[in-house]
């Protein structure tokens, strides 16, 4: 698809053809199974200062935590026993030897505890090659590192000067060279973002030949510079909530058509804007859901953005509810399966 066609689809008020095509391609490739990745938000300590993020280092209002070791192990074991197939360990970015070793230790313990059966995805930011390698040796098989926006100028507007687009890109390449299953993604509806930028993002995923993508709407957080400068204004049409939702679904459908065999996540941010946002995304292209397994006492401190869903139900209830919702759209959970990216598996 060329840029003009993509932009036309992003603009259309009737995406039914687009969604029908994406549905059909999804049925023919990844099928109706949805794979679960139990999300453990390991720590909200972060050394970086992204202008859009609620847990950026300069936000002094945040009560910082690391999930205690036993709780991480309990969450991983729960995921394994329930047949989730995989977990994701996510946190703010820290680049110390201590952090590297802590994660390495956790990975080793999780692998032993789960009889080497659980699939582990990491989302711990930019690290050096040695760190990525050690975490891989300890059991991690996938890595998520969103480029946030593939447009360099927009990236620079959203980050302080010491955050480097090229360094982030280099990390994605390092992860690919190490043979991780690599995922990236962007935020949709950012201040200053245009439809051309979103078309570029789709191009970027293709050029980078990534295995997985997680894209979600940008959601403002009041204690961030992006909100206090421009975010509050909702200045561009792209920033209206309903447009962000609509655009995210269209982006997912376009991506499924463009890269039929990759894994695409229906993100938590989507659920924040619309109670059924994730299910809508699954219907038209996504095939991954990341149920939150962060222990409740830590959860309310992992606020990347406002209004983030903090589910108070038990984990069992959450999954039972998800099963019902998925059945309603003809999808089913792929229990006890890693649900690896078919795109990755078909690489030489
Ligand atoms: N620190 C790591 C992982 C945790 S942040 C990293 O940055 O890679 C995970 C993701 O949360 C980020 O990649 C970003 O895309 C998303 N995020 C942060 N602030 C957000 C906001 N205000 N709205 C929507 N998503 C946001
Ligand atoms: Fe830190 Fe990630 Fe938030 Fe940036 S997006 S401030 S790296 S947690």
Image: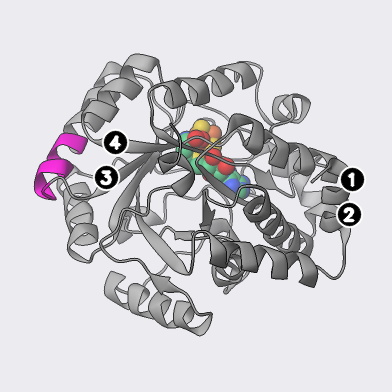
Q: Is the CB of the residue bearing disc 4 within 8 angstroms of ligand 1?
A: no
Q: Is residue 347 above or below residue 325?
A: above
Which residue is tagged 1? 4
Query: Marks 1 and 4: CB-CB under 8 Å?
Result: no
Cα distance, mark 2 to mark 1?
6 Å
Q: Is residue 150 left or right of residue 77?
A: right
Q: Residue at the spot x=57%, y=34% of the render?
A: 209
Image location of residue 257, percent across then percent down = 67, 54
Which residue is tagged 2? 8
Q: Is residue 186 above or below residue 124?
A: below
- The image quarter containing residue 109 is top left
Give the mark nearest the N terminus, 1 or 3. 1
Mark 4 or mark 3: which is in front?
4
Query: Marks 2 and 1: CB-CB under 8 Å?
Result: yes
Cα distance, mark 1 to mark 3?
46 Å
Examine the rendering and report whether any part of residue 64 can be seen. no
Q: Is residue 6 magenta?
A: no
How crowded pointer 1 is (Cα within 10 Å; few <14, some 14-19, many 20+) is rated as few
Give the mark nearest the N terminus, 4 or 3. 3
Q: Residue at the spot x=47%, y=77% of the render?
A: 326
The residue range painted magenta reads 107-115
**Magenta segment, prevailing SS (helix, strand or loop):** helix
Is disc 4 placed on a helix, strand or loop? strand
Is disc 2 placed on a helix, strand or loop? helix
Which residue is tagged 4? 140
As rendered, which of 255 and 310 lies closer to the eye?
255
């Amino acid at each position: 698809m060329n840029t003009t066609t993509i932009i036309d689809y992003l603009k259309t008020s009737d995406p039914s053809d687009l969604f029908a095509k994406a549905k059909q391609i999804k049925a023919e490739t990844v099928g109706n199974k949805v794979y679960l990745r139990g999300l453990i938000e390991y720590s909200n300590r972060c050394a970086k200062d992204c202008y859009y993020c609620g847990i950026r280092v300069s936000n002094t209002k945040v009560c910082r935590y690391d999930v205690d070791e036993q709780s991480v192990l309990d969450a991983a074991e729960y995921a394994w026993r329930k047949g989730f197939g995989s977990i994701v360990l996510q946190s703010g970015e820290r680049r110390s030897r201590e952090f590297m070793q802590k994660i390495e230790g956790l990975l080793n313990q999780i692998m032993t505890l789960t009889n080497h059966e659980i699939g582990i995805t990491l989302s711990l930011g930019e690290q050096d090659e040695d760190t990525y390698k050690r975490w891989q040796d300890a059991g991690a098989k996938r890595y998520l590192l969103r480029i946030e926006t593939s447009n360099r100028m927009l990236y620079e507007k959203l980050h302080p000067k010491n955050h480097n687009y090229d360094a982030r890109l280099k990390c994605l390449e390092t992860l690919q060279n190490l043979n991780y299953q690599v995922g990236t993604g962007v935020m949709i509806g950012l201040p200053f973002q245009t439809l051309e930028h979103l078309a570029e993002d789709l191009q970027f995923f293709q050029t980078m030949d990534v295995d997985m993508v997680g894209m979600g709407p940008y959601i403002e957080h009041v204690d961030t510079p992006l909100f206090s400068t421009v975010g509050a204004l909702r200045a561009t049409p792209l920033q209206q909530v309903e447009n962000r939702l609509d655009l995210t679904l269209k982006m997912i459908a376009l991506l499924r058509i463009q890269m039929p065999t990759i894994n695409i996540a229906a993100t938590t941010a989507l659920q924040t804007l619309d109670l059924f946002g994730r299910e809508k995304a699954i219907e038209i292209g996504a095939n991954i859901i990341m149920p939150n397994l962060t222990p409740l006492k830590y959860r309310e401190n992992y606020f990347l953005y406002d209004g983030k869903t903090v589910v108070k139900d038990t984990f069992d209830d959450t999954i039972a509810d998800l099963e019902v919702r998925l059945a309603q759209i003809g999808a089913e959970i792929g229990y006890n399966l890693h649900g690896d990216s078919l795109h990755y598996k078909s690489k030489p």
